[in-house]
Image: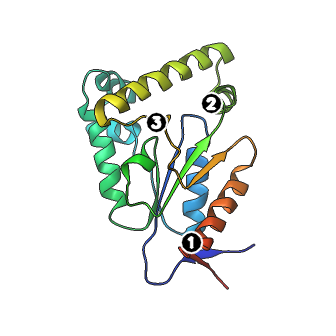
Amino acid sequence: MTTYKIASGRELRIAISGKSGCGNTTVSKLLAEGLGIKLINFTFRQLAAEKGISLAQVMENAKTDDSYDIEIDTRQLELARKESCVLASRLAIWMLKEADLKIYLIASPDERVKRILKREGGEFEEVKSFTLMRDSQDSARYLRLYKIDNDDYEFADLKIDTLKYAPDRIVDIILKELLKRGLVEREG
Protein backbone atom coordinates (compact mmCIF):
# COMPACT_ATOMS: atom_id res chain seq x y z
CA MET A 1 0.00 0.00 0.00
CA THR A 2 1.29 3.45 -0.92
CA THR A 3 1.49 5.88 1.96
CA TYR A 4 1.59 9.64 1.66
CA LYS A 5 2.78 12.55 3.76
CA ILE A 6 2.33 16.30 3.49
CA ALA A 7 4.86 17.85 1.16
CA SER A 8 7.94 19.09 2.98
CA GLY A 9 7.74 22.51 4.60
CA ARG A 10 4.04 23.13 4.19
CA GLU A 11 0.68 22.81 5.88
CA LEU A 12 -2.33 21.23 4.21
CA ARG A 13 -6.01 22.04 4.61
CA ILE A 14 -8.62 19.92 2.87
CA ALA A 15 -12.31 20.84 2.95
CA ILE A 16 -14.91 18.13 2.34
CA SER A 17 -18.64 18.81 2.10
CA GLY A 18 -21.77 16.93 1.16
CA LYS A 19 -25.30 16.44 2.39
CA SER A 20 -26.31 14.07 5.18
CA GLY A 21 -25.62 10.42 4.27
CA CYS A 22 -23.20 11.14 1.42
CA GLY A 23 -20.21 9.57 3.20
CA ASN A 24 -18.57 12.82 4.30
CA THR A 25 -17.64 11.67 7.82
CA THR A 26 -16.36 8.26 6.67
CA VAL A 27 -14.22 9.62 3.83
CA SER A 28 -12.89 12.53 5.91
CA LYS A 29 -11.90 10.24 8.78
CA LEU A 30 -10.10 7.80 6.46
CA LEU A 31 -8.29 10.64 4.68
CA ALA A 32 -7.19 12.35 7.91
CA GLU A 33 -5.94 9.03 9.32
CA GLY A 34 -4.12 8.22 6.08
CA LEU A 35 -2.30 11.55 6.10
CA GLY A 36 -1.75 11.62 9.86
CA ILE A 37 -3.49 14.97 10.25
CA LYS A 38 -6.33 16.24 12.39
CA LEU A 39 -9.97 15.67 11.47
CA ILE A 40 -12.16 18.63 12.35
CA ASN A 41 -15.84 17.82 12.51
CA PHE A 42 -17.17 19.95 15.37
CA THR A 43 -20.92 19.34 15.60
CA PHE A 44 -24.02 20.19 17.60
CA ARG A 45 -23.29 16.99 19.59
CA GLN A 46 -19.97 18.38 20.89
CA LEU A 47 -21.53 21.79 21.51
CA ALA A 48 -24.28 20.17 23.59
CA ALA A 49 -21.69 18.36 25.71
CA GLU A 50 -19.77 21.60 26.26
CA LYS A 51 -22.91 23.49 27.25
CA GLY A 52 -24.13 20.64 29.47
CA ILE A 53 -27.45 20.29 27.63
CA SER A 54 -28.91 17.56 25.44
CA LEU A 55 -28.38 17.35 21.70
CA ALA A 56 -32.18 17.58 21.28
CA GLN A 57 -32.16 20.84 23.24
CA VAL A 58 -29.35 22.31 21.12
CA MET A 59 -31.23 21.39 17.93
CA GLU A 60 -34.45 22.89 19.28
CA ASN A 61 -32.66 26.08 20.36
CA ALA A 62 -30.92 26.37 16.99
CA LYS A 63 -34.28 26.61 15.22
CA THR A 64 -34.77 30.12 16.60
CA ASP A 65 -31.25 31.12 17.66
CA ASP A 66 -28.65 31.54 14.90
CA SER A 67 -25.84 31.74 17.45
CA TYR A 68 -25.65 27.93 17.59
CA ASP A 69 -24.87 27.60 13.87
CA ILE A 70 -22.54 30.59 13.95
CA GLU A 71 -20.64 29.19 16.95
CA ILE A 72 -20.19 25.77 15.28
CA ASP A 73 -19.03 27.31 12.00
CA THR A 74 -16.71 29.83 13.68
CA ARG A 75 -15.14 27.18 15.92
CA GLN A 76 -14.53 24.85 12.98
CA LEU A 77 -12.80 27.60 11.01
CA GLU A 78 -10.66 28.61 14.00
CA LEU A 79 -9.56 25.00 14.49
CA ALA A 80 -8.91 24.48 10.76
CA ARG A 81 -6.68 27.54 10.54
CA LYS A 82 -4.40 26.35 13.37
CA GLU A 83 -2.86 23.29 11.67
CA SER A 84 -2.97 20.85 8.79
CA CYS A 85 -6.37 19.18 8.78
CA VAL A 86 -9.34 17.73 7.01
CA LEU A 87 -12.38 19.92 7.69
CA ALA A 88 -15.56 17.91 7.29
CA SER A 89 -18.79 19.87 7.35
CA ARG A 90 -21.79 20.70 5.22
CA LEU A 91 -20.24 24.15 4.56
CA ALA A 92 -16.49 23.38 4.64
CA ILE A 93 -15.83 24.08 0.94
CA TRP A 94 -17.58 27.44 1.13
CA MET A 95 -16.33 28.57 4.55
CA LEU A 96 -12.66 27.52 4.42
CA LYS A 97 -11.83 29.66 1.41
CA GLU A 98 -8.08 29.05 1.81
CA ALA A 99 -8.43 25.25 1.64
CA ASP A 100 -5.78 23.65 -0.59
CA LEU A 101 -8.34 21.20 -1.96
CA LYS A 102 -12.14 21.44 -1.89
CA ILE A 103 -14.13 18.24 -2.37
CA TYR A 104 -17.88 17.82 -2.70
CA LEU A 105 -19.33 14.34 -2.20
CA ILE A 106 -22.52 13.52 -4.05
CA ALA A 107 -25.15 10.83 -3.48
CA SER A 108 -28.77 10.66 -4.62
CA PRO A 109 -31.46 11.29 -2.00
CA ASP A 110 -32.50 7.60 -2.04
CA GLU A 111 -28.90 6.42 -1.58
CA ARG A 112 -28.39 8.85 1.28
CA VAL A 113 -31.58 7.59 2.93
CA LYS A 114 -30.38 3.97 2.60
CA ARG A 115 -27.10 4.87 4.29
CA ILE A 116 -28.84 6.78 7.06
CA LEU A 117 -31.17 3.80 7.60
CA LYS A 118 -28.20 1.46 7.83
CA ARG A 119 -26.53 3.75 10.37
CA GLU A 120 -29.57 4.78 12.44
CA GLY A 121 -32.46 2.45 11.57
CA GLY A 122 -36.07 3.46 10.88
CA GLU A 123 -38.58 3.23 8.05
CA PHE A 124 -37.51 4.26 4.52
CA GLU A 125 -40.33 6.73 3.79
CA GLU A 126 -40.08 8.40 7.22
CA VAL A 127 -36.31 8.78 6.97
CA LYS A 128 -36.61 10.04 3.39
CA SER A 129 -39.21 12.62 4.39
CA PHE A 130 -37.09 13.77 7.34
CA THR A 131 -33.90 13.89 5.24
CA LEU A 132 -35.50 15.97 2.47
CA MET A 133 -37.04 18.31 5.06
CA ARG A 134 -33.65 18.66 6.77
CA ASP A 135 -31.95 19.36 3.41
CA SER A 136 -34.50 22.08 2.71
CA GLN A 137 -34.16 23.66 6.17
CA ASP A 138 -30.35 23.50 6.00
CA SER A 139 -30.31 25.14 2.56
CA ALA A 140 -32.65 27.93 3.67
CA ARG A 141 -30.58 28.55 6.82
CA TYR A 142 -27.24 28.64 4.93
CA LEU A 143 -28.69 31.08 2.41
CA ARG A 144 -30.12 33.30 5.15
CA LEU A 145 -27.06 33.21 7.43
CA TYR A 146 -24.21 33.24 4.91
CA LYS A 147 -25.68 33.81 1.43
CA ILE A 148 -24.42 30.29 0.56
CA ASP A 149 -26.36 28.16 -1.90
CA ASN A 150 -25.21 24.67 -0.91
CA ASP A 151 -26.56 23.27 -4.19
CA ASP A 152 -24.00 25.39 -6.09
CA TYR A 153 -20.75 23.44 -5.67
CA GLU A 154 -19.39 23.66 -9.22
CA PHE A 155 -16.31 25.51 -7.92
CA ALA A 156 -15.19 22.45 -5.91
CA ASP A 157 -11.88 20.97 -7.07
CA LEU A 158 -13.29 17.45 -7.00
CA LYS A 159 -16.91 16.38 -7.23
CA ILE A 160 -17.21 12.67 -6.45
CA ASP A 161 -20.32 10.53 -6.83
CA THR A 162 -20.07 8.26 -3.79
CA LEU A 163 -22.36 5.67 -5.36
CA LYS A 164 -19.62 4.86 -7.87
CA TYR A 165 -16.79 4.22 -5.38
CA ALA A 166 -16.21 2.70 -1.94
CA PRO A 167 -14.85 5.11 0.70
CA ASP A 168 -11.26 3.80 0.45
CA ARG A 169 -11.34 4.28 -3.33
CA ILE A 170 -12.60 7.86 -2.86
CA VAL A 171 -9.66 8.49 -0.52
CA ASP A 172 -7.32 7.12 -3.23
CA ILE A 173 -8.83 9.55 -5.77
CA ILE A 174 -8.27 12.45 -3.35
CA LEU A 175 -4.70 11.38 -2.55
CA LYS A 176 -3.86 11.14 -6.27
CA GLU A 177 -5.17 14.68 -6.78
CA LEU A 178 -3.13 15.93 -3.82
CA LEU A 179 -0.04 14.22 -5.25
CA LYS A 180 -0.68 15.71 -8.69
CA ARG A 181 -0.88 19.19 -7.13
CA GLY A 182 2.36 18.66 -5.18
CA LEU A 183 0.54 18.94 -1.85
CA VAL A 184 1.59 15.46 -0.69
CA GLU A 185 4.46 13.14 -1.51
CA ARG A 186 4.85 9.39 -1.42
CA GLU A 187 6.54 7.91 1.61
CA GLY A 188 9.10 5.15 1.46
Extreme front residue here?
154
Q: Which residue is mark 2?
A: 116
Residue 6 place in picture, x, y as percent: 52, 75
- SS label for mark 2: helix
Amino acid carrying label 1: it is Arg
Is 150 placed left or right of 184 in the picture?
Answer: left
Distance of mark 1 from mark 2, alpha carbons? 34 Å
Name the kind of residue labelled 2 in the image. Answer: Ile
Looking at the rendered image, the disc whose residue lies closer to the viewer, 3 or 2, is 3
Q: Residue at x 76, y 44 (%)?
A: 164
Q: Position of residue 81 (x, y in %)?
A: 33, 62
Mark 3 or mark 1: name the one nearer the start of the chain: 3
Disc on the earlier residue, 1 or 2: 2
Quadrant location, the C terminus: bottom right
Residue under circle 1?
181
Query: Mark 3 sits on what residue?
Result: 150
